[in-house]
Image (tube, rainbow, N blue to C red):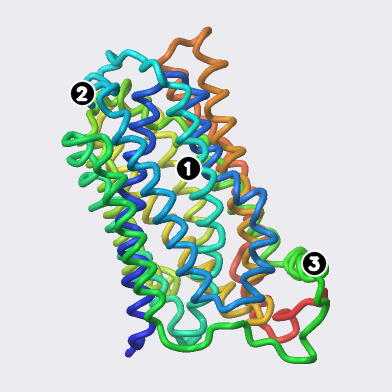
Amino acid sequence: MRLGSRYWKLWSASVVSNLGDGISTIAYPWLASAVTRNPVHIAAVAVVTRLPWLLFSLPAGVITDRVDRRKLAASMDVVRFLATLAVAFVVLAVQPDLANPDDVAAGLADVPGNASLLLGVIYVAALLLGTAEVLRDNSAQTLMPSVVEKEHLEVANGRLWGAEMVMNSFVGPPVAGILIAVAFSLPFFVDAGTFAIAAALVFLIAGDFSPKRTSEHSGSTSFWGEMKTGVAWLWGHQLFRPMAIALGILNGSMMMSLATFVLFAQEILSLDATGFGLLTTGVAAGGVLGSLIAHRVTGRLGQGATLMLTILGSAAASVVSGLTSSFWVFWTMGLFGSFVGVAWNVITVSLRQSLIPDYLLGRVNSVYRFLGWGMMPVGSLIGGLLVAVVEPSLGREWALRMPWLVAAATTLALFAYALPRLNSTKIDEAKAPADVAPSS
């Protein structure tokens, strides 16, 4: 099977930018933990990063359906390059005032005098980077059906996510731990460089990637009207509506746990920056495994059964992670949870790319991600508040464990909602011609 040079340029750009993302997943929370030990302030970084998915997803879909999607994706990588470079220079200027990484991990670091300024810079950067990510990711996903045949989408997406997971969780985080040990600002400079390379690669993809809109599908030309069309299409779809709601609950539960993850790693698992980075290699291993065999599991069990198993698997991984103090047990749960997460993505994204008409793909995809990703800042906020509220009565340790346990319970409740709505029968019905394009 030949996927073509355009696919491999898109693949390479995603791999490079995900190396930067993997570095930033360690660099930003570690920087925040050097500035404050307050769980609400730590969680606020995750809240601000994901807030654009709640606020900007819907207009981003209209923009994606109006412009060349390749140029939009590349332009957003340029924005991320400039924003990250600015953060790098700010951190470079203040790093003499920051404690060394070992003292941060041990909770011995004094709060620097410019803590409020640094937190402000982190929040502003997180908001800007998150907004660019909304446009970049939405446009990149809508590019895939233009460079790969529909029958190859699951394999193409699987290979893309496998490589992304390697860079995002296997290579990037350990590299970040090493870079932080050298200088707090260094990972931010490297992160900025990856966005510049990714932008160049996407700009090199040949072709016109404007949406294929015909006169019969032109619909409303107003910004608000086009947004309403995307919302109505998804909300009227008997498969994608519950799928988006389920994704929102899964992502909200995940972010509930991850909002204060850096404190959990430091205080419960007793990890330094390098160990924190190595912890995510389990996530990478599971993601790679899922990307390689998810389509085979789907072929054997069916798409509906596989989706149900991913929900149960996520709940199991959360409860074990929340109860353990072992690096290796947590690492193994990261592997397992990542495997089922990638299986979910391979199925659901490929279904969206194959069933949603191209002229609506950007808008409907953005509505789906508004519901699915918009819950991430909500989950992050709940996670931080949960730790702060529980700590006075149960103590710091169980306060940091509690988000994982609540996330597990929430995911188990989701299973009851999803079972009658996301089974293989419902998926087969959605594939039938009469259900491919519900009226708006």
Q: How far apart in space, not on screen, are marks 1 and 2 (Cα)?
A: 25 Å
- Residue 353: x, y in percent? 56, 76
Q: Is residue 286 left or right of residue 401?
A: left
**Quadrant that contains the C terminus:** bottom right
Q: Amino acid at mark 1?
A: Ala
Q: Amino acid at mark 2?
A: Asp
- Residue 170: x, y in percent? 25, 52
Q: Mark 1 or mark 2: which is in front?
A: 1
Image marks 3 and 2: residues in contact by CB distance under 8 Å: no
Secondary structure found at label 3 = helix
Instruction: Give the numbered dot on residue 232.
Output: 3
Quick check: 144 above or below 31?
A: below
Q: Earlier in the sequence, mark 3 or mark 2?
A: 2
Q: Nearer the viewer, residue 258 or 6?
A: 6
Q: Nearer the viewer, residue 393 or 410?
A: 393
Secondary structure found at label 2 = helix
Residue 236 showing in the rendered view: no
Instruction: Give the numbered dot on residue 395.
Output: none
Q: Nearer the viewer, residue 330 or 117?
A: 117
Report which quarter residue 188 is drawn in: top left
Secondary structure found at label 1 = helix
Residue at 62% x, 71% y: name it: 64
**Residue ID for mark 1:** 125
Dot 2: within a 10 Å radius of its alpha carbon, few (fewer than 14), some, or many (20 or more) residues? some
- Residue 418: x, y in percent? 63, 54
**Residue ID for mark 2:** 102
Q: Is residue 418 left or right of residue 334?
A: right
Q: Earlier in the sequence, mark 3 or mark 1?
A: 1
Residue with the most extreme top position: 393
Dot 1: within a 10 Å radius of its alpha carbon, few (fewer than 14), some, or many (20 or more) residues? many
Q: Mark 3 or mark 1: which is in front?
A: 1
Residue 68 showing in the rendered view: yes
